[in-house]
């Protein structure tokens, strides 16, 4: 292993013997610290949920429906999860996330392909795209999103826009997963 190779992420408990007084400290304890730090850096995320409860077609086109997510720190989106509780009779539910810069000016969609669920889906359908692990869940009737922007400066914001909805569909929503990053990582 080269000195520049990252320590493997590992969620490990420190033991009393690792840090007990008058015991020699070895590379083992630093490996545990490094593994735990890398585990947190890789897998720990914050979330923003947008929920469309009940018959949600009335929310189509409304700006700021169920709030705005503002970033306290430079951040990176690492995944998205979206769902529909009761499938509609026809049509497609299409979500979009719009990005606002620090001046509050809309900068457009963060997707080049928006997430969608159509009426061929079953009740309680979910879609998931994990950019960290490359895990996708895309059952019948689901179109997974393709991101065009994933990094944001502190003070920038996102809001949900419902472009369209299935007729008579109920209980839907979208969650983004994000984590802080270094300023030089914002593109």
Image (spheres, grey):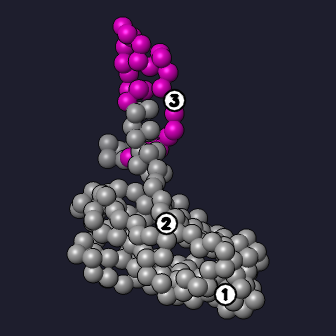
Secondary structure, mark 2, is strand
* Disc 2 crowd, CA 10 A, few/some/many (<14, 14-19, 20+): many
Residue located at (50% from left, 40% from top): 10
Residue located at (41% from left, 26% from top): 29
* Disc 1 crowd, CA 10 A, few/some/many (<14, 14-19, 20+): many
The majority secondary structure of the magenta stretch comes to loop
The boundaries of the magenta stretch are: 6-30
Q: Circle 3 sits on which residue?
A: 13
Q: Circle 2 sits on which residue?
A: 176
Real-space Cα separation, disc 2 to disc 3, in angstroms: 29 Å
52 sits to left or right of 178: right
Q: Is residue 166 above or below residue 133?
A: below
Q: Which mark is residue 166?
A: 1
Dot placed on the residue nearer the N-terminal end, 1 or 2: 1
The label nearer to you, 3 versus 1, is 1
- Please, which residue is most extreme toward the top here? 22
Q: How many marks?
A: 3
* Disc 3 crowd, CA 10 A, few/some/many (<14, 14-19, 20+): few
């Amino acid at each position: 292993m080269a000195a520049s190779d990252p320590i493997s992420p590992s969620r490990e408990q420190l033991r009393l013997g690792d840090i007990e007084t008058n015991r020699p400290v070895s590379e083992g304890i630093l490996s545990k610290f490094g593994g735990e730090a890398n585990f947190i850096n890789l897998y720990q995320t914050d979330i923003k949920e947008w929920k469309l409860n009940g018959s949600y077609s009335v929310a189509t086109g409304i700006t700021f429906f169920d709030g705005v997510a503002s970033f306290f720190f430079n951040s990176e989106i690492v995944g998205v999860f979206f769902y529909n509780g009761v499938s509609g009779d026809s049509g497609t539910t299409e979500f979009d996330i719009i990005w606002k810069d620090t001046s509050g000016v809309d900068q457009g969609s963060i997707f080049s392909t928006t997430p969608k669920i159509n009426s061929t889906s079953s009740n309680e359908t979910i879609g998931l795209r994990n950019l960290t692990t490359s895990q996708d869940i895309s059952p019948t009737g689901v179109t997974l999103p393709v991101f065009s922007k994933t990094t944001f400066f502190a003070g920038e914001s996102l809001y949900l826009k419902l472009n369209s909805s299935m007729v008579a569909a109920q209980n839907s929503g979208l969650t983004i997963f994000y984590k802080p990053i270094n300023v030089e990582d914002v593109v």
